[in-house]
Amino acid sequence: SPKPTLSPPRAFLSLSPKLPLLLAYITLSLASADTSLSLRRVTPGRVRRLGSLAGRRRDGWMYLSNRRGVRVRGETDTSLLTEGYDDMTGNQRFDETWLTMFRKKDGIRCPFWRRRAADLLETALGLGRFFLARHKRLDVNPLVISTGSKTTGLDLVEIKDHIQNDFQKGKYYVSGKLTKSIYADDCYFDSPDPDMPVRGLRKYVDAISHLFDQKQSDIQLLDIRILDDKRVLARWRLEGTLMLPWRPKFKAYTGCTVYEVDSRGLIVRHIEKWSISALDAFISTVAPDWPLAAEPALSAEKLKELPNFGAPSHESILLM
């Protein structure tokens, strides 16, 4: 018979008698570690168990990428690494503290405790990505950040085509990979998510890039059309897994998004509406069959046979 597995809460409780000793040892070890240690020689052994930071292994080296897309191999200047990576949180204070702890953990002599420290840091980074990168109240830099050059003067048909491509190829709702050149840097984003609204394209992309497990999540475009001379409407279906250490799944739901364009031909408003409430979406990750839960969305094929493709009405968005 298969070996029974413990749920995350029970697994945590089963380890609780050992946690004080583990945390005390790691804390003391990190505090006494040689602060002159650096990541100058980045090898698979030195970033062991931290696959979330690691790129592909080639020729025995571990490749890392910083936010500028530069591939770093072998002998690496520490100043490059402290600039952060694409999969850090975007919160400067947290990222710098985490990188400092990451360097110090190499001062732990015992391989067992060094790996436990790496596990602890990896978990902290995963939680940091999920909460800090997306929570507007924790943003230490409220200024709008440039995301590069913009493509102005596009008509709505061209903008619609870009949005459609971002859905179908980029899966931008779960990956954050959208065409930044057609959005204003101070674009306003709103949805039923408690952490919305957010103003700023960079902030929004950082948030959704760390919200879903891209391998286990999917966004399907049901319909996209031009509403009037300055708005595009998209209807979609989303399901998948949240990027938390225990990978909770959420049920499929539908939604609609209205994109509003200004006189420059840039998207300045991105407003969405869901077929379920934010409360239902949250509770369903831990109790899918709770009494007030809405039914999961049908498959994309069946939704396309329904009025409005089974998505909520966009009329209320137009009144906002």
Image: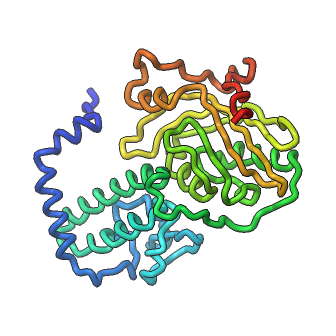
Looking at the image, residue 202 sits to the left or right of residue 122; the answer is right
Q: Give the colour scheme shown.
A: rainbow
Q: What quarter of the picture does the N terminus occupy?
A: top left
Residue found at x 80% / y 41%? 231
How many numbered markers are drawn?
0
Q: Nearer the viewer, residue 75 or 86?
A: 86
Q: Hey, which residue is sitting farthest front in the picture?
A: 319
Image location (x, y in percent) of residue 149: 74, 67
Q: What quarter of the picture does the C terminus occupy?
A: top right
As drawn, 18 above or below 92: above
Looking at the image, residue 67 sits to the left or right of residue 160; the answer is left
Image location (x, y in percent) of residue 40: 39, 82
Image location (x, y in percent) of residue 2: 28, 30
Q: Hey, which residue is sitting farthest top in the picture?
A: 291
Residue found at x 72% / y 29%? 314
Image location (x, y in percent) of residue 198: 57, 50
Residue found at x 55% / y 52%? 209
Q: Nearer the viewer, residue 279 or 168?
A: 279
Looking at the image, residue 229 sits to the left or right of residue 208; the answer is right
Residue found at x 63% / y 47%? 189
- Kindly indicate the quadrant of the structure image that contains residue 36: bottom left
- Kindly indicate the quadrant of the structure image that contains residue 98: bottom left
